[in-house]
Amino acid sequence: MTSTTPQHRTTAAPRATTPAPVAPRTRHRPWQTAVAVVAVAVGGILGAATWSSMSTSTSVLVAKDTLHRGDEITADDFTVTKLNVDAALDPVPVEELQAIAGQRLSLDIAKGAIFTRAAAAPFSTTREGMTLVGIAVTGGQAPGTPLLVGDRVRVVVTPGPSGEVEGVPDTTSAEVAGVTPGSQPGSVVVDLLVPAANAAVLAAQAATGNVAVVLENRER
């Protein structure tokens, strides 16, 4: 009789499984939400402002170089550019430049500045109680620096052919109203505003050619 030894089947123990990590739940604080809302709103406002600025820019006239009061207005003095301009500045419309060309500036315009109606206002070389006297001068009778409209000057009576100076020379205070080329090479005619009571004497002195113009003050 054969005996059979019973065999025991070994059962593998179940493998332990590691649970998948669970992402932490994000908690939104109220202040973070408020900041995000404000940021979005500000971005929208800035975008709208930029669009509005671009859409309301205006074509204006800008000086290519510094221009002075009394200078003749020409189209070549200005360039056209688009800017967002305050209406209170009252710029001269581009289409009106040709109509006012040939007139004279009533104000100085710095290089790169906008041409305004104030600068294009009618320019007058006369004034109540004042008389306009023209004096022709050549080199040595006026400063090397070009005289400009509005300059305060003094006209000095110079010695005659003898060259002798006796006492204090006569002088007359005046304001430059214009400067134009003279009939002789290197000469200019300076238009001066002087009190009416001094005009006759100054004109007589200027006719002799024995005068010099001295720059006293330049306030722009």
Image (spheres, rainbow, N blue to C red):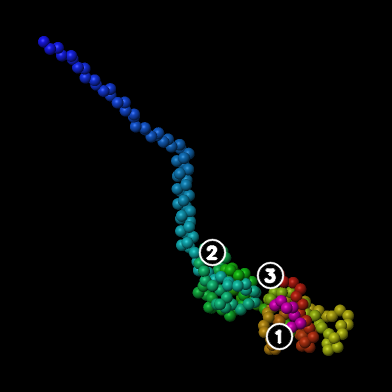
| Residue 177 figure quarter | bottom right
Of the residues under marks 2 and 1, which one precedes in the sequence?
2
Up-down relation of residue 134 to residue 39 (above or below) = below
Per the model, the C-alpha gap separating discs 2 and 1 is: 43 Å
Give the magenta-colored segment's residue range. Answer: 139-147
Task: Label 1: state its secondary structure.
Answer: loop
Residue position marked by numbered label 2 in the rendering: 85
Q: Nearer the viewer, residue 96 or 169?
A: 169
**In the picture provided, is 179 more to the left or to the right than 48?**
right
Q: Earlier in the sequence, mark 2 or mark 3?
A: 2
Q: Amino acid at mark 1?
A: Ser
Residue 115, position as x, y percentages in the image? 57, 70
Amino acid type at image mark 2: Val
Q: Residue pushed farthest front?
A: 1
Find out whether the residues at labels 2 and 3 contact each other: C-beta distance under 8 Å. Answer: no
| Camera-nearest residue between 7 and 216 | 7
User: Dot 1: few (<14), some (14–19), or many (≥20) neighbours within 10 Å?
Assistant: some
* Cβ atoms under marks 2 and 1 closer than 8 Å: no
**Which quadrant would the N terminus be assigned to in this image?**
top left
Which corner quadrant of the image does residue 161 belong to?
Answer: bottom right
Residue 187: x percent and y percent? Answer: 71, 85
Q: Residues within 10 Å of mark 3 (few under 14, many from 20)?
A: few
Q: Residue at x 77, y 85 (%)?
A: 206
Q: Quadrant of residue 150?
A: bottom right
Q: CA distance from mark 2 to mark 3?
A: 24 Å
Q: Give the labeled residue for mark 3.
A: 220
